[in-house]
Amino acid sequence: MPKVKFYTGIDIPLEFHRARIVQKVRLLPIDERYEALKKGGFNTYRMDSADVYLDMLTDSGTNAMSDLQLAAMMRADDAYAGSESFKRLEKAVFDVLGKRYVVPAHQGRAAENVIMRAFLKPGDVVPMNYHFGSTANHIRINGGRHIDLVAPDVAFTSASDNQFKGNIDIARLEDCIAKYGAEHIPFIRMEASTNLIGGQPFSMANLMEVRKVADRHGIKVLLDACLLGENAWLIIQREPEYAHATLAEVLLKMCSLADIVYFSARKLSCTRGAVIATDNYQDKLKMDQVVAVFEGYVTYGGMSMKEIEAMAQGLYEATDEEYICQNPEFIRYFVNEAVRMGIPMVTPPGVLGAQIDAKKFCDHLPVKDLPASSLAAAIYLCSGVRTMDGGTYQDVSEDDPDFVADMELVRMAFPRKVLTLSQTMYALDRLKWLYDNRKLIGAIRCHDIPGMQRCFRTPMEPVGDWPERLIAKFKQDFPDSL
């Protein structure tokens, strides 16, 4: 991508797109924000979008589509079977990911359902760099379990200079295979990039080592490609061997090292839907059977053809460095500025979002007080910015009352091509104010709702009157501001 230097010496990300369609948002006064927070049960997932100023909850389905994607939707062939739109998607998958066979599904976790039902047997284990909540749940309900194999001393150290915290520990992988047996391991899963430990990438060198281990033991490699473009971009930035490679070249090489590639289009191609891709026709047939039962016909998989057309165009745009770089560049700017202000962040900056170390930010709160959940609520209260609790209550508990997540993070997501620099600076400003007043943040308790993905559904409540005291301090410091 072109590197633009500013004459004044400032180091800020520069957008390579212009906004042509805008959506109005409103910043509620703080008292109204408090009422909205109470209405949502102090759980940011349960809040109404109309009450949110900046939505930094996730980039899933919130990325901006391009003009070419919107135009492509107008030529959709709505045939139930054998659609021309599906053929264009197949070509895009082959051109960008290098895989011949395409299995569609209506979204990313539906693709995981298809994969696990097709390949996982009760008692199987799935080694991976790190789990995502829906992935772990699909493995669990099909009778298996996941095993996280990042290096704990590297991956769980929030402030670090390790460039690839998402790498699998190869020695631990070999030990895992020796312990459980290759016959009980349907695949080794690599997530690009590891969401729950701060959006951290893995290196090409590590993926190549994983491939070698898999080949020695006759095990498939499964690549979760939701944020593959950003992982590939960081490989170019951080791995010297690929410094002069194009994004398209790196994407193809990464996918060539996997037997099955799947992605949520809500992330990779800025659309709805999902794709599973492979070069193994027999594997495609196994998955087609599941699609036919749970998703629809094998050339639409629960999606409209308009979505499929936009997805095909979006895949080509995933090779455009000027598009892909905005997410990691805005995150880099945000994280570096926050660190300069003394705010504890996950470093080096990753992808998907800027990640706050909630245990350090709220070091006066023990983990049982759910510091990540409290911090997410406090951020909304003082700014109108919706973030995501990435701590103990967000992670997979498997109904274990003593479960504690490996990290307590709050994620401030940066959807592609959505936020402006001034909005980013506003979020930073309010985060700095909150950090300076962090001792006012108190505990939060949840109304326990058993079962999977509980974070989406569970109301919470603050312990004591800390929200009122935080509001009083805000009004003292910002008497004439929202």
Image: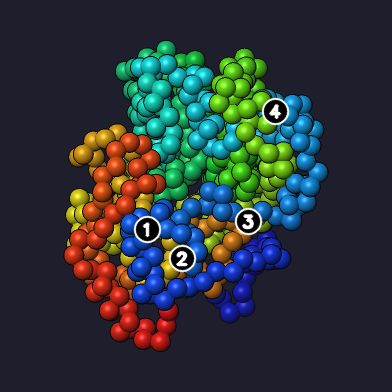
The crowding category of the residue bearing disc 2, from other C-alpha atoms within 10 Å (few below 14, some 14 to 19, many at least 20), is: many
Q: Amino acid at mark 4?
A: Thr
Q: Is residue 275 left or right of residue 350?
A: right
C-alpha separation, residue under disc 1 versus residue under disc 3: 26 Å
Q: Secondary structure at mark 3?
A: loop
Marks 2 and 4, how far apart in space? 39 Å
What's the image's color scheme? rainbow
Query: Going by the image, does 126 lie left or right of 415?
Result: left
Q: Which residue is mark 4?
A: 299
**Position of residue 473 measured from the top left corner of the image (x, y, whole percent):** 28, 79
Where's residue 431, x and y in %?
Answer: 38, 69
Closer mark to the observer between disc 2 and disc 3: 2
| Mark sitting earlier along the chain (1/3) | 1
Judging by the rendered image, the residue that carries numbered circle 1 is 40
Frontmost of labels 1 and 4 is: 1
SS assignment at label 2: helix
Q: Amino acid at mark 2?
A: Asp
What residue did someone put label 3 on? 64
Badge 1 marks a residue whose secondary structure is loop
In this view of the protein, which residue sits in the foreground, 71 or 304? Answer: 304
The residue under label 3 is which amino acid type?
Ala
Residue furthest to the bottom: 480
Q: Are marks 2 and 1 in contact (CB under 8 Å)?
A: yes
Q: Quadrant of the C terminus?
A: bottom left
**Foreground of the two, 324 or 440:** 440
Mark with earlier residue (1, 4): 1
C-beta proximity under 8 Å, tags 1 and 3: no
Q: Amino acid at mark 1?
A: Gly
